[in-house]
Image (cartoon, rainbow, N blue to C red):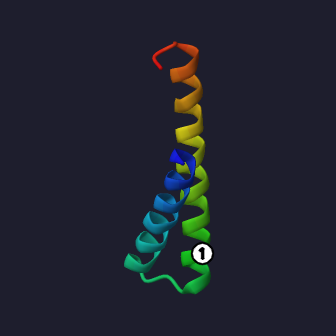
Amino acid sequence: MLVTLAFVLGLAIGWLRAKKMGGNRMDCVQYAVVHALALTLLVLVGWVIVGWLNWV
């Protein structure tokens, strides 16, 4: 659930950043996908670290 939320949040952030800079639709898609993948990867790495340190 947390990974899906991170992916969707990344999509929204990327899309809005591209729109703010005046990008066309393909720019928005590219920014959205890159932000979504980056945020999802960050959450997954954090999840592994938390599990590795036995914080949960």
How busy is the neighbourhood of tag 1: few (under 14 within 10 Å), some, or many (20 plus)? some
Q: Position of residue 49 (x, y in %)?
A: 55, 22
Q: Quadrant of residue 22?
A: bottom left
Which of 4 and 30 lies nearest the eye of the viewer? 4
Of all residues, the one furthest to the bottom in this rendering is 24
Residue 34 left/right relative to 2: right
The residue sitting at 52% across, 31% down in the picture is: 46
Q: How many marks?
A: 1
Residue annotated with mark 1? 29
Q: Amino acid at mark 1?
A: Val
Q: Position of residue 20 (x, y in %)?
A: 37, 77
Residue 13 left/right relative to 34: left
Secondary structure state at the residue bearing disc 1: helix
Relative to residue 24, is residue 54 depicted above or below? above
Of all residues, the one furthest to the top in this rendering is 53
The residue sitting at 43% across, 79% down in the picture is: 19
The residue sitting at 57% across, 85% down in the picture is: 25
Q: Position of residue 16 (x, y in %)?
A: 41, 73
The residue sitting at 41% across, 77% down in the picture is: 21
Q: Quadrant of residue 48?
A: top right
Relative to residue 1, is residue 19 depicted above or below? below
Q: Position of residue 40 (x, y in %)?
A: 57, 48
